[in-house]
Image (tube, rainbow, N blue to C red):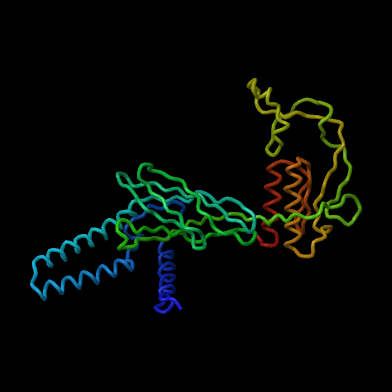
Amino acid sequence: MSWAEVFGIGRLSRLLRNWSLRRFPRRRTVRLTQNRIYILPTAAGVGFIFLLLMLLLLAINYESNLAYGLTFLLVSLFILSIIQTYANLAGLEVTALRGHACYAGEHAGFTVELRAAKGRDHEQLVLSWEQGTPLTLDLTDQRVAQIELACAAPRRGWLYPGPLKLETHFPLGLFRAWTWLDTGLRALVYPKPLPCRAPESGGGDGAMESRRTRAQGFEDFNGFSRYENGVSLHQVAWKVYARGQGLHVKQYAGAASDEVWLDWDRWPAVSEEERLSGICYWALELTQREQPYGVRIPGVSLAPASGEAHRLRVMRELALFGQGA
């Protein structure tokens, strides 16, 4: 059993954190002031206090002016350390910008911006999520910095990293100043794509249902149309764009293509998560091939399409499947 468990330090820290978060509403941008910054001595600071008491007793016992002078000098250093440690956080502006999607089992990234107080440097700043890896940086030459903090994403759905902890031990490590910020950031976690056998087409038992349709192909040129979000960049008429006539897409006609459906009911996986992972894998595979595909899962049917916008819609539906609004 650790010392933190013996003295209940971990539980006390959680109570203090929850009390601090209840004091302030959730905000994306926060400027740190005295009512948000907490400061306490570190283990080294407690040892330094003990040293000061010993020196003071020694000076009193031997009536030594040299011992008095050394004691008062170290007390001054101790007080200055309190002020400097607090000032290293005071005035700092923290802005939570965005969360970045990832796949289950990876680490989601969250972008945070730090802006230094006017005329002040901030050194040895440590930022971390509760379940994330700490990141240390200085704000000296640059006044604004954007950083990405990672947080483990063990399962699909919305990932909330929890409160952001910002702390510092600068300059002497005798004190620790820290704060917690409720940023409200979240990131979408997609199902983990699991490679599986190529599904069969047609009327077999495979998961991918295919039917022949007359569709847009790449054989006979049939003019231009206006560019729409989600259309492959390979179809963009770049020469037309270079002439200053805007984004247009080349149209072709006369080719037959496969309209592919990734159907939940036909997927041979045995569990819900395996089905989602298999559909996710083949959605990414078909997107890479630039082949239109549709998705049918309980409660959701997305018509066949291609492009990045379609992929994002599919990934979102797979990530939030069965998790309510």
Q: Quadrant location of residue 63?
A: bottom left
Q: Is residue 161 left or right of residue 205?
A: left
In the image, 71 versus 227, the foreground residue is 71
Residue 170 in the image: state x and y as whole percent: 32, 56
Q: Residue furthest top?
A: 243
Q: Residue furthest right?
A: 203
Task: State whether residue 144 is above or below residue 163.
Answer: above
Residue 54 in the image: state x and y as whole percent: 20, 73
Residue at image location 61% in from the left, 62% down from the top: 154
In the image, 269 versus 99, the foreground residue is 269
Q: Is residue 88 left or right of residue 220?
A: left
Q: Quadrant location of residue 270?
A: bottom right
Task: State whether residue 14 is above or below residue 239.
Answer: below
Q: Is residue 16 left or right of residue 173?
A: right
Q: Quadrant of the C terminus?
A: bottom right
Q: Quadrant location of residue 45?
A: bottom left
Residue 76 in the image: state x and y as whole percent: 19, 61
Residue 209 in the image: state x and y as whole percent: 85, 50
Residue at image location 53% in from the left, 49% down from the top: 98
Q: Is residue 42 left or right of residue 240?
A: left
Residue at image location 51% in from the left, 59% down from the top: 132
